[in-house]
Image (cartoon, rainbow, N blue to C red):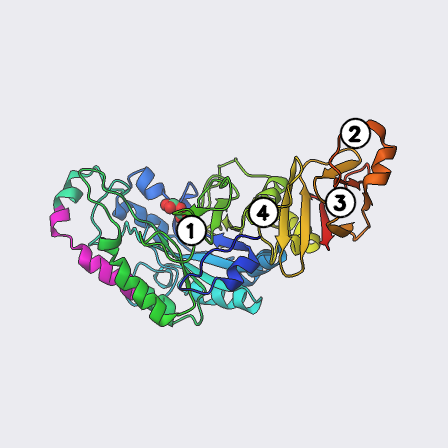
């Protein structure tokens, strides 16, 4: 039995097949180059923060190159920050001048991006911030850059969050009507009350009404869970769930989002970059628990992907080129196949194949409990070389190795040398 989440209002069929997407966080904070929350972290007033807007000129921006990097890595969809918390908009919105077309760059950044990714058959997702540290009617809260500024706080009485909600709905409408079919809208995020600040959640965002509009404009779209009303996708952030994500005891569609390093926006001096080996394993780990991985790049102020991100994307692509069969269309393996130590299973229910990902290459033998009568053929996925299967009779030749072994133990005979790939995968054709 494989786990199957209950249907949601949107179309999750492509999503649970494709498994691997690119997150992009891009805004004027790329110029500060020290986290996309820099305005809040350093409590920078808007007048001062505008220097990043005034100097925003990503002259090397080449969305074709971005889309190539993502497609070559094996990613099947992308989610771009149309607006992050700073409030800056990548597209030529009619509702504010705080947008790409008014910077020195002077052009819409979103449209060519959507077209480039779409041309490579990738699905299009929009991240849209619910927080907005630029909008004049957006009140202070514990995350707001002006949370300690008495003058700003005094003015809050005159601010009208209903006006902000109108702006939010208006921009969402633009995003869902001017760019063709949109597959995901990824709102971020809701805030609990934190005295003296009130909560900002479904009442302030008018989430119900917003969701209704979104569904009317893009009926198949997937909506995430951060409007304070769960919709199609749960979004664990920067941690690896211990198992398939459940809500109220039921398995749900989920997507972990992760950075390459410790920041979403471009951060020049941040050094906690994950290795390609770690990243490939994170992707496998997600799929082995029935989830997706959305992996984030923060492009630079010149408009390029950081070389550290490009290197890792290329390495992941090398692995995906030969192993994507263990990712696309795959999910958590049924419980009846217990996974050996240091390994992860994924399973393709359509082809009835099990994929054994070997995280730590053992010496010569891998023992699979209860599998002797279940596997018809086994091969290494990277080169389709047969993996010898030792059943009961042959196991005896290894003497004590098989003593006390369960009757239906299957032993795989592996080459002594680990195959020359990041994570070797053994494809098991089930009977
Ligand atoms: C958080 C952060 C943010 C990032 C997001 C991605 O909510 O506020 O900077 O965009 O998570 O999941």
- Whether residue 156 is visible here, answered yes or no, is yes
The residue identified by callout 1 is 234
Q: Which residues are magenta?
A: 155-171
Q: Secondary structure at mark 4?
A: helix
The residue identified by callout 3 is 372
Whole-Å distance between the Cαs marked 1 and 3? 37 Å
Whole-Å distance between the Cαs marked 1 and 4? 16 Å
Q: Which mark is residue 288?
A: 4
Q: Quadrant of the C terminus?
A: bottom right
Dot 1 or dot 4: first in sequence order is: 1
Q: Nearer the viewer, mark 4 or mark 3?
A: 3
- Kindly tell me whether mark 4's CB lies below 8 Å from ligand 1: no
Q: Secondary structure at mark 2?
A: loop
- Whether residue 93 is visible here, answered yes or no, is no
Q: Secondary structure at mark 1?
A: loop
Residue 67 at x, y = what percent?
56, 60
Tell which residue pokes out farthest to the front in this image. Answer: 407
Question: Mark 1 touching mark 3, by CB under 8 A?
Answer: no
Dot 2 or dot 4: first in sequence order is: 4
The residue identified by callout 2 is 403
In-image side of 241 versus 385 (left or right): left
- Tell whether position 106 is magenta: no
Number of residues whose C-alpha sits closer than 10 Å to that of mark 2, classed few (under 14), some (14–19) or many (20 or more): few
């Amino acid at each position: 039995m494989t786990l199957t989440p209950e249907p949601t209002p949107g179309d999750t069929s492509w999503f649970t097949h494709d498994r691997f997407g690119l997150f992009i966080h891009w805004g004027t904070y790329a110029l500060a180059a020290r986290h996309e929350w820099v305005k809040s972290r350093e409590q920078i007033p808007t007048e001062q923060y505008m220097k990043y807007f005034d100097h925003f000129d990503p002259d090397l921006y080449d969305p074709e190159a971005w889309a190539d990097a993502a497609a070559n890595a094996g990613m099947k969809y992308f989610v771009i920050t149309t607006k992050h918390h700073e409030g800056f908009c990548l597209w030529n919105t009619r509702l504010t001048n705080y947008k790409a077309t008014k910077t020195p760059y002077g052009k819409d950044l979103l449209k060519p991006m959507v077209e480039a990714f779409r041309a490579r058959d990738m699905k299009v997702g929009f991240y849209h911030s619910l927080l907005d540290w630029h909008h004049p009617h957006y009140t202070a809260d514990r995350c707001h850059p002006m949370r300690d500024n008495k003058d700003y706080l005094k003015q809050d009485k005159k601010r009208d969050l209903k006006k902000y909600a109108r702006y939010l709905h208006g921009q969402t409408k633009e995003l869902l009507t001017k760019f063709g079919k949109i597959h995901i809208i990824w709102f971020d995020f809701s805030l609990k009350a934190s005295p003296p600040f009130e909560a900002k959640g479904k009442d302030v965002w008018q989430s119900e009404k917003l969701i209704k509009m979104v569904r009317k404009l893009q009926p198949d779209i997937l909506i995430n869970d951060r409007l304070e009303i769960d919709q199609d996708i749960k979004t664990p952030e920067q941690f690896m769930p211990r198992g398939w994500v459940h809500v109220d005891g039921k398995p749900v569609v989920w997507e972990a989002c992760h950075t390459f390093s410790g920041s979403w926006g471009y951060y020049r001096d941040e050094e906690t970059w994950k290795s390609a080996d770690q990243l490939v394993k994170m992707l496998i780990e997600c799929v082995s628990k029935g989830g997706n991985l959305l992996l984030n790049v923060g492009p630079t102020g010149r408009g390029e992907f950081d070389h550290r991100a490009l290197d890792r994307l290329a390495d992941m692509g090398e692995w995906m080129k030969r192993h994507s069969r263990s990712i696309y269309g795959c999910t958590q393996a049924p419980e009846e196949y217990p996974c050996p130590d240091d390994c992860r299973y994924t399973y393709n229910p359509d082809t009835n194949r099990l994929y054994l990902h070997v995280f730590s290459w053992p010496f010569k033998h891998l023992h699979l409990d209860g599998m002797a009568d279940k596997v018809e053929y086994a091969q290494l996925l990277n080169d389709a070389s047969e993996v010898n299967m030792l059943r009961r009779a042959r196991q005896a030749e290894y003497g004590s190795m098989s003593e006390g072994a369960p009757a239906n133990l299957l032993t795989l005979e592996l080459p002594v040398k680990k195959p020359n790939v990041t994570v070797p995968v053994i494809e098991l054709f089930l009977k």
